[in-house]
Amino acid sequence: MTFKLLLHRIGPAFYIPLIFIAGPIVAHAQEAVDFFRGNCTSCHTIGGGRLTGPDLKDVTQKKDRAWLVQFLQSPQAMIDKGDPYALKLKEEARDVVMPNINGMTPALAELLLTMIEAESKLPKSQFAGLQISDRPFTQHDIELGKALFMGDKRLANGGPPCVTCHTFNGAGGFGGGHLGPDLSRAYERLQGRKAMGAWLYAPATPTMSLTFSKKALKAEEILPLLALFEDTARSGAEDNRTGLAGFFAMGFLVAILLLALFAVIWKARFRAVRDPLVQMSARKVLGGRS
């Protein structure tokens, strides 16, 4: 019996167990990739340099795995107890503390660290980050960014304009929405175009991640928005809310005008029938007696 024939006969018995063994491994690896993409890429890269948080390339060589698993589950708890390395990370992030991540467990933390180790060995990780041009912003960039923010120009993938939930100093009119934070100084808070660009590309907040998960901003849209936010941050002021005050003032004025209009219309309303007839009859009777 040749080796080829033998392999043909025992093939199913050999490969089927491998499928059952490898299947869960592949599924877990994909789980880590999906979780990292949805929760971590707004603040971290793997080999792409620092954003708000540190570059995670070779992170398991910088700190022991047990410590990393513990930190991933509760960064604030590590800081509160005065862990020196956690405090160092906080200082390097300009006092920005990594939030606790919903769904984080020891098992998931292990999967993430294994995935980061594998990505760190690649020539270029899929999480190297969005490549944003470092050319100087122009006035055209700023104007285009404002048009995208205000919804005057539609986003290519159909996402809602920023003004739906956010405002900034210079939005004009009634200003923007107030569901999300004022973005007047977001460029400054997020430490520049690279970190803020990553946030715009993969926002980690629950509302934004749900909204833009399938309608991500394109690089050619992110750059003008960054130009707008940089220009706005230079003013050093938050939205003064004059737009909101104007909205209420306009609402009050419209209400007064409507009440006046109703008063005019109401003069021509249908009035009572019986009372005028009774009064008329009474006058006739009294007039006849006099």
Image (spheres, rainbow, N blue to C red):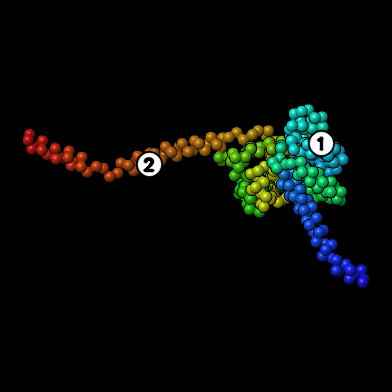
Q: Is residue 64 above or below residue 210?
A: above
Residue 87 location (% of width, % of height): 79, 30
The three-letter code of the residue at mark 1 reads Trp
For label 1, the crowd category at 10 Å Cα-Cα, with few meaning under 14, some 14 to 19 and many 20 or more, is few
164 relative position to 249: left or right: right
For label 2, the crowd category at 10 Å Cα-Cα, with few meaning under 14, some 14 to 19 and many 20 or more, is few
80 relative position to 206: left or right: right
Is residue 39 at least partly visible in the picture?
yes
Mark linked to residue 162: none
Residue at 83% x, 48% y: name it: 119
Q: Is residue 81 above or below residue 62?
A: above
The three-letter code of the residue at mark 2 reads Leu
Mark 2, secondary structure of its residue: helix
Quadrant of the image for the N terminus? bottom right
Q: Which residue is mark 2?
A: 261
Examine the image and state in which quarter residue 289 appears.
top left
Residue 40 location (% of width, % of height): 74, 43
Q: Which residue is mark 1?
A: 67
Q: Is residue 159 above or below residue 8?
A: above
Residue lying at the far right of the rendered structure: 2
Quadrant of the image for the C terminus? top left
Residue at 45% x, 39% y: name it: 254
Residue at 82% x, 65% y: name it: 12
185 relative position to 25: left or right: left
Answer with mark 2 or mark 1, whichever residue precedes in sequence: 1
Closer to us: 237 or 215? 215
